[in-house]
Amino acid sequence: MDGIRLWRSYSVSSSAGHPSGRIDVTVNAVRDGVVSSYLLNNARRGMVLNLDLPAGDFVVPRQRPAKSLFLTAGSGITPVMGILRSLVHELSDVVVVHSARTSEDVVFGADLRALAEQGRITLIERHTGAEGRLKPADLDALVPDRFERETWACGPGEMLDALSANWSEAGAAERLHVERFRPTVLIAGEGGTVTFERSGKTVETPGGVSILDAGEAAGQLMPSGCRMGICYSCVLPMREGIVRDMRDGTVTTAVEGDNVLVQTCISAAAGPCHLDA
Ligand code: FES
């Protein structure tokens, strides 16, 4: 876009091994979503997009669980749809609890309801516009055996935080697998001036903005992949400076000549930074 290559992570929502070799990704345009809005308005047959290798651990193990539960909200259904389309015939007892504002807002609503009608899944829809947001306590009645189920959850950060706390309290944390759209920002750094030494670009960044986002916004060509701290595609050497890990607040410093490697997608400037890029 405008000469800058932007990378985003999307879930494969089609079944694995489609004979055509094609995959689907499902893009929901989000407010202020630079790439999602661009794709929605401009994606055309013949457009060339670069794909990186898949990354992450939101996967069903080869040893299929006896009972599974998928807890999703909004576009959090997309990785689960890929799993269901690929594997539902190999899973025996599947419950899907999905939240969306209204019945019409359910992404893949027709597909999910068809799977339920075929008896492949037990589908519980939560329409938050009328019923309010799903809380972990609501699951006591909806899925009484939830802690016995291998569970995959994908949706907004607050929902995943609440579910993680609930599963931990029940001593079942190892059975809950979550997929986050973006890293949870726990502690914002103070920000600072980031200098990209090779290109000569500089950008003022506030503490809550990743160096990756700030660099891209300033027109710097930035390597990236998952944008959530998993794949290490975004690593750049920091010659000198101080950054804060936006997930846990860890501060990393480099003095001149150190060349400390920094994951730019989850690091915010916490003072002046000089990057070798
Ligand atoms: S883009 Fe994947 S770790 Fe930063």
Image (tube, helix red, strand yellow):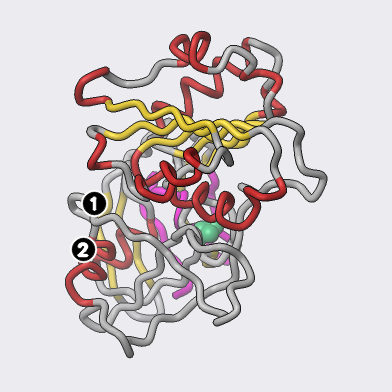
Q: Amino acid at mark 1?
A: Val
Within-10-Å neighbours for mark 1: few <14, some 14–19, many 20+: few
To which quarter of the image does residue 70 belong? top right
To which quarter of the image does residue 124 belong? top left
78 versus 20 height, above or below: above
Residue 33 within the magenta-colored segment of the rendering? no
Q: CA distance from mark 2 to mark 1?
A: 7 Å
Residue sitting farthest toward the right: 63
Image point (44%, 12%), residue name: 138
Disc 1 target residue:
30
Q: Secondary structure at mark 1?
A: loop
User: Is label 2 in contact with label 1 (beta carbons under 8 Å)?
Assistant: yes
Residue 210 can be seen, yes or no: yes
Image point (42%, 50%), residue name: 111
Q: Secondary structure at mark 2?
A: helix
Please name the predominant secondary structure of the magenta segment in the image.
strand
User: Which corner quadrant holds the C terminus?
Assistant: bottom left
Report whether the residue tagged 1 is closer than 8 Å to ligand 1. Answer: no
Q: Which residues are magenta?
A: 252-277
Q: Position of residue 241 (x, y in %)?
A: 46, 54
Q: Amino acid at mark 2?
A: Ser
Left of 151 or right of it: where is 117?
A: left
Disc 2 target residue:
37
User: Which corner quadrant holds the N terminus?
Assistant: bottom left
Image point (68%, 26%), residue name: 149
